[in-house]
Image (cartoon, rainbow, N blue to C red):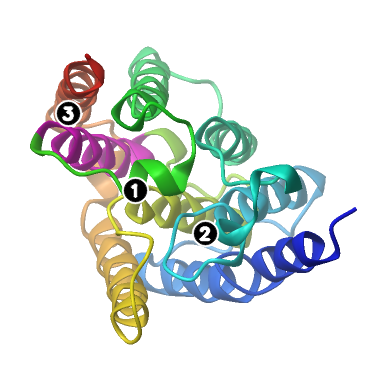
Amino acid sequence: MDPLGVLLEVLALAGYPGGLFLGVMAWVTYRGAGLPAGPALDARGAAAIAAALVGAAMAPLPDSPAASLPPPGGATPNLVAAILLLAVAVSLVAPRPWSLPRQGLAAFGVGALVLLGLVAASFSLSNIAGTTGGTGVAARILAAVAVLVALPLVVKPHLPTGSGAARAMVVASTVEVVLGLLIPPAQPWPVGPLWVLGLAVAVAAYAVLLRLVRAATQQENAALVTLAAVCSAAASVAAIIAGRP
């Protein structure tokens, strides 16, 4: 066992980018979006929070302890692992039954994110966030836009179906990971903290936007569904082009 690796894992889960940092982002999301409290936290909500916490701990943010783990530690931030954890968290808090548009958006969004592995020829979140090149950057931006547009349509966080804390945590963790893919991971002081501050501001702005489009997302507005689907398709195509030798 690598003691340093274990310590870094604990810091990533308990402090930043998971734990306390995610908790603050979830509170900002809860308040900014005006999410209803809903029923008390149950087993499903607790499981969703746990999955979201571990997923957020993999976010490729500047100075993330998880990003310092060497491959022998077996815990390098992995795109597929993060997506699976967030998908589980979303499935636990999203209302049922799932309409066809919601199923399609979830599948397209996951596909667009997975294909980002082609951009860096790696599923390492840090490697993907650090890639350059116009097509690869476009793929990351389009995938982020697709997920951010689709997220409230899929989760419908304003419906009081489950704990408000769990819904806020799932939304905040997903936004944190997706926006983290747009931030260069290796940043000197004080540039790194400024990126993180910008992320926090972006989460707050996104939360307010969720409040403004509440009715449209609950009704699965056709324009939003189309926008998310088009961005997912464009991101997938850009990632495939960027990954070609």
Q: Amino acid at mark 1?
A: Ala
The span picked out in magenta is 135-153
Kindly tell me whether residue 38 is visible in this rendering: no
* Element at label 3: helix
Q: Are marks 3 and 1 in contact (CB under 8 Å)?
A: no
> Residue 175: percent from the left, percent from the top?
39, 53
Q: Amino acid at mark 2?
A: Ala
Q: Earlier in the sequence, mark 3 or mark 2?
A: 2
* Element at label 1: helix
Residue located at (56% from left, 55% from top): 56
Residue located at (45% from left, 62% from top): 35
Say if 23 sits above or below 230 in the image: below
Overall secondary structure of the magenta section: helix
Name the mark on residue 231.
Answer: 3
Name the mark on residue 129.
Answer: 1
Q: What's the CA distance linking mark 3 and mark 1?
A: 19 Å
Q: Nearer the viewer, mark 3 or mark 2?
A: 3
Q: Earlier in the sequence, mark 1 or mark 2?
A: 1
Q: Amino acid at mark 3?
A: Cys
Q: Is residue 19 left or right of residue 62?
A: right
> Residue 77: percent from the left, percent from the top?
57, 46
Residue position marked by numbered label 2 in the rendering: 168
Residue located at (59% from left, 31% from top): 84
